[in-house]
């Protein structure tokens, strides 16, 4: 009976840990009338491949489907370290854009999302992200 109880406790603890590590993340910014929403299914980001979803809405709240979206993931400069940066182009999927980013080490990262539309100045939104 003690072995079964012990095994059950290990399974419950592992489930709690897994749930804590896979918590999603969503944030948004409005810049010059354009709202840029960034989300990740798992947060903090992991070292390696991470999928990001970016939704872009105009001033009236309608999805923007005709933009070129890019993400520059970078770690702010630190003394004695080479700059770290990863750039990805968004791919349109329905009302959103998806891309993959790859943080090279654990720590605080910045995601610079650029939204470019024909005939308009590019919109730049900056988000703080963590990787572990």
Image: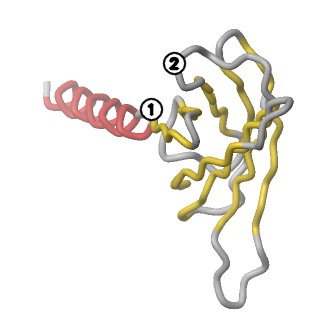
Q: Residue furthest front?
A: 119
Between residues 87 and 113, which one lies in front from this camera angle?
113
- From the top left corner, tell me how far across and down residue 114 is, in percent: 73, 44
Q: Does 95 appear above or below 15?
A: above
> Residue 102: where, in percent of width, then height?
73, 48
User: Which residue corresponds to the image point at 28% horizontal and 36% vertical from the top-left?
Assistant: 13
User: Which residue ends up furthest to the top in the rendered image?
Assistant: 94
In the picture, the quarter occupied by the N terminus is: top left
Q: Position of residue 45 (x, y in %)?
A: 56, 46
Q: Which mark is residue 132?
A: none
Q: Residue 32's quadrant in the figure?
A: top right
Of residues 113 and 45, the one drawn nearer to the viewer in this rendering: 113
Say which element carries label 1: loop
Q: Position of residue 85 (x, y in %)?
A: 77, 61
Q: Which mark is residue 24?
A: 1
Asked if residue 84 lies left or right of residue 79, the reply is right
């Amino acid at each position: 009976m003690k072995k079964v109880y012990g095994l059950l406790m290990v399974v419950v603890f592992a489930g709690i840990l897994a749930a804590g590590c896979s918590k999603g993340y969503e944030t948004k910014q409005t810049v010059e009338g354009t709202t840029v929403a960034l989300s990740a299914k798992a947060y903090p980001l992991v070292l390696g491949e991470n999928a990001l979803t970016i939704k872009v809405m105009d001033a009236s709240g309608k999805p923007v489907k005709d933009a070129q979206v890019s993400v520059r993931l970078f770690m702010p400069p630190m003394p004695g370290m080479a700059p770290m940066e990863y750039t990805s182009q968004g791919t349109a999927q329905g009302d959103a854009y998806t891309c993959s980013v790859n943080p090279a080490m654990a720590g605080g990262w910045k995601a610079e999302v650029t939204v470019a539309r024909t005939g308009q100045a590019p919109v730049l939104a900056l988000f703080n992200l963590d990787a572990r």
